[in-house]
Amino acid sequence: MKTPEDVIDKISDKLPYSKAVIRSVISKSFIELKERLSRKEMVMLRGFMKFVCAGDKKTKTLSMEDYKQLKTKDK
């Protein structure tokens, strides 16, 4: 995926919503993320990812492969 439209196209292929609705949801999600991070709040999307401001980062950044290995160690 190279452009936002690629993301929107891929999502619209899998969900029964119009591209306009999908574009709106994605846009509003990233606006909210940006606003919260600008206030130096941590944002965690459970089961997906955790976002922190780079300057405030106190934890190690994990690749998706590292994250998957951590999840499998708990089982």
Image (cartoon, grey):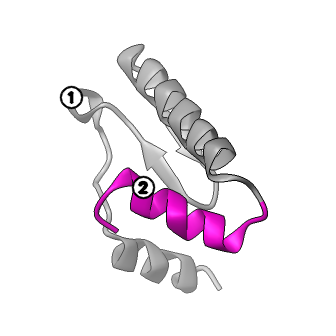
Badge 2 amino acid: Glu
Which residues are drawn in magenta?
Answer: 1-16
Image point (28%, 54%), residue name: 60
Query: Viewed as shown, does residue 49 lie left or right of 66?
Result: right
Instruction: State the predominant SS element of the stretch in magenta.
Output: helix
Disc nearest the viewer among 1 and 2: 2
On the question of residue 41 being in view, the answer is no
Image point (73%, 66%), residue name: 15
To which quarter of the image does residue 54 belong? top left
Instruction: State the count of labels.
Output: 2
Q: Position of residue 39 (x, y in %)?
A: 42, 13
Query: Viewed as shown, does residue 70 lie left or right of 54?
Result: right
Query: Viewed as shown, does residue 75 lie left or right of 10?
Result: right
Q: Which residue is mark 2?
A: 5
Q: Which residue is mark 1?
A: 55
Image point (28%, 63%), residue name: 2
Q: Is residue 74 shown above or below 57?
A: below
Secondary structure beneath label 1 = helix
Query: Viewed as shown, does residue 54 lie left or right of 29?
Result: left
Q: Is residue 18 shown above or below 31?
A: below
